[in-house]
Image (tube, rainbow, N blue to C red):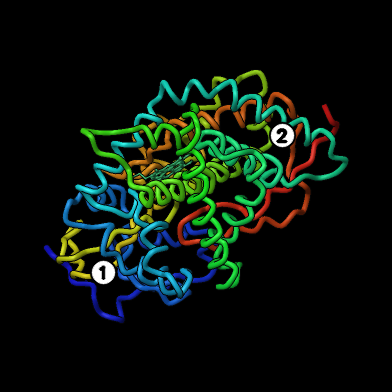
Amino acid sequence: MTREMGKADRMIELPQEFFDDPYPVYARLRAQGPVHEVRFPDGMRGWIVVDYEAVREVLRNPTVHKELNPALEVFKRAFLPQDRPKRTFTRVASHMLNTDPPNHTRLRKLVAPAFVPRRIEALEPRILAIAGELLDRIAEATGPVDLLTEYAFPLPITVICELVGMPVEDREQFREWSNLAIDNANSSKDEVQRAITGLEDYFDQLIERRRGEEPGEDLISALLAATEDGDRLSHDEMVSMLFLLLIAGHETTVNLIGNTVLALLTEPEKYRALHGNPDAVPGLLEETLRYDSPVNLATFRYTTEPITVAGTTIPADQLVFCALGSANRDERRFPGSEIFDPDRPQPNHVAFGYGIHFCLGAHLARLEGRIALTELVRRYPDLRLVEGAQLRWRESTIIRGLRELPVEFASAP
Ligand code: HEM
């Protein structure tokens, strides 16, 4: 039977504490039903889908969209330079994650060869070396260290910059712009606009420079050369692709690493048990992906016609948030779902999404996570959380991750 839930008295308001710990809120919502109308603390409204099967139902529904999404309009008005919003919007946000077929199919096909397992596995020695260099630097610390700033963040960002072909000397500037653009709740509108324009102009120049050079092994060279049935990426599409890859490539994996280390250090014997047992790492990472999904709440979709999800009708022109973090705690799919249990059988979680937008970087994220954790435990078997440290979570409707992860070790290796 269809249930109509458009009435204000049925609307759920997500409390501010949601960001510290969304899971009790999700559990309450799941107990009441799979689909709810919702208002966020910042006033944004939409529908939230919280059950595993219902989330998958939305994500595979070809009548829900990414294009025509009014959340992108809000972004356009708020954060894009007002003298050239349209041009910047096309170049910043019209990438595959914001498009529907046939555009999506075409854009994904052109870049997918760079992310097949064989190409990603070839990066292993380089990722190992980057992890080693970062851990060497940590060894010089004399007191507590923020593991996110010193390790979990620079590792994936260095890998993705190298993969794309960004010169080493530009990385600090890129990192600054990228932080401002992503953590837009903590940056002023002007700062965000300047960062976005800075990135846009930088990518313009980088692509142009590459066009005039001998092709290298990097992704920009590959994209300049790639054709699919004679089709190529336009210059603006390439700018947009770089935005997506560089941001998706580091804002997520940092939290896979951070959330896993946190889960382990909360019960230190679990961390110590990993020493000499690297085979356990992949299972642990999968359990973090399920238990504390780095992309947690807002995988957006937009309805252009009414849809019925698990018996509830969502009207046309609505934002729909598929709460991956909640789907991954659904008892019916994951018995004992509130317990972090790396030994559980691993029925497919949806931490990397589902359907045509399934994460293109999943192999890379898993490889980076495996190397990051294995090397950390090998070098610092006695790592622990700084006693009494207050853990603060980012206030993001997309990302589930800590602001910092203060750790210390009894003795430097
Ligand atoms: C898409 C999660 C790492 C590139 C997605 C989606 C999710 C996700 C949930 C689908 C979003 C939606 O349907 O709206 C994650 C997580 C990661 C991670 C949890 C780390 C633990 C990466 C990395 C890259 C990457 C390292 C590499 C550059 C992409 C791209 C898409 C995507 C290009 C868009 C795919 C499409 O639209 O077809 N990711 N991601 N991701 N991810 Fe990731």
Q: Quick check: can you spot residue 205?
A: yes
- Write the residue at 61% across / 53% down: 402
Could you say which quadrant of the image residue 298 lies in?
bottom left
Marker disc for residue 309: none
Residue type, mark 1 in image? Gln
Element at label 1 = loop
Residue 292 spot, x, y in % from top left? 50, 46
Mark 1 nearby-residue class (10 Å; few <14, some 14–19, many ≥20): many
Provide the residue designation for mark 2.
Answer: 134
Residue 137 at x, y = what percent? 78, 35
Residue indicated by mark 1? 318
**Foreground: 344 or 141?**
141
| Element assignment for label 2 | helix
- Which kind of residue does numbered mark 2 sit on? Leu
Mark before the other along the chain sequence, 1 or 2: 2
Front one among 294 and 225: 225
What residue do we see at 53% from left, 36% from top? Answer: 165
The N terminus, quarter of image: bottom left
Residue 272 located left or right of residue 409: left
Q: Residue at x 41, y 20 (%)?
A: 118
Q: What percent of the width, then of the height, locates residue 88? A: 42, 63
Q: How far apart are marks 1 and 2 (CA)?
A: 45 Å
Q: In which quarter of the image is ligand 1?
A: top left
Which residue reaches farthest front?
212
Instruction: Please indicate whether residue 337 sits to the left or right of residue 140 in the image.
Output: left
